[in-house]
Amino acid sequence: MFLTPQDVELFFKLHRALMFFVNQRLKVIPDDIASPDAFSSLSPEARLKVRDAFLNRTDLIQAFVEENPASLTSDELDIVRSWQHLVHGKFYVFRQLKKYMVFLSTDQQPVAYGVLALSQPFDELIGPYLPVLTQTVLLPFKGMIVYDGLMSSYRISFGPGIRRSLNESFNEAKARHGIVTTLPMSKASLPAKTPKPRPVPLPPIAKT
């Protein structure tokens, strides 16, 4: 499932404004970049450097919101402010469901996230064969989870043993938190499912 074209446009407007601000502060790309639109025209490699520097300075989100250099509306600033709850790292792009793609974290206690594509389907980005190990940033957006438009994939083949282990991790993640579709995620675990009682067989009727 995708964002609507209007939401895609809004997401990229906000994200490039923030990344332009980050680069102005951190000087990751020393070239004179005149505007957020100019920043968005940089190569993916250059934008990735800025994004990675930002991950070490997420306090710049609050600075951006307070200064509001892009003259955003209050609703738009609320979206950017919510990005303080981002999640980044390595994920297995694990399974396509009807409403979202499941990203399974590589944490010791994995979390399954339901992530929406932006303007390009995930199979065009990483290919049709899942799972795929990737590195990216997940962001809240209007009650949904999206990725930030930058994704690095690892060309690794997974044998039956790894696939079985990932299925087990996915099932454990679902049992613990369900599939997480908003950020920040709730810290509370789901209640353990009570096994259904098995019917007790009736004693045989004695023949007379």
Image (cartoon, grey):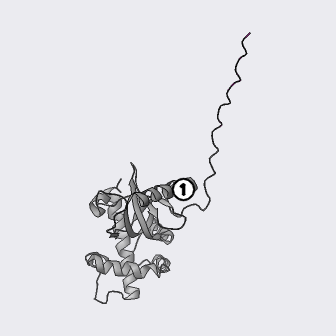
Q: Quadrant of residue 202?
A: top right
What span is in magenta? 196-208
Q: Nearer the viewer, residue 68 or 193?
A: 193
Q: Residue at x 36, y 87 (%)?
A: 28
Direction from residue 138 to residue 205 in the image, left or right: right
Q: Position of residue 174 (x, y in %)?
A: 52, 54
200 in magenta: yes
Q: Residue at x 35, y 81 (%)?
A: 49
Direction from residue 127 to residue 163 in the image, left or right: right
Q: Amino acid at mark 1?
A: Glu
Residue 103, above or below 71: above
Q: Which residue is mark 1?
A: 172
Q: Residue at x 29, y 79 (%)?
A: 45
Q: Position of residue 33 (x, y in %)?
A: 29, 84
Residue 77, above or below 3: below
Q: Quadrant of the C terminus?
A: top right
Q: Nearer the viewer, residue 131 or 47?
A: 131
Direction from residue 189 to residue 119 in the image, left or right: left
Q: Main secondary structure of the magenta part?
A: loop
Numbered disc 1: secondary structure: helix
Q: Position of residue 91 (x, y in %)?
A: 43, 66
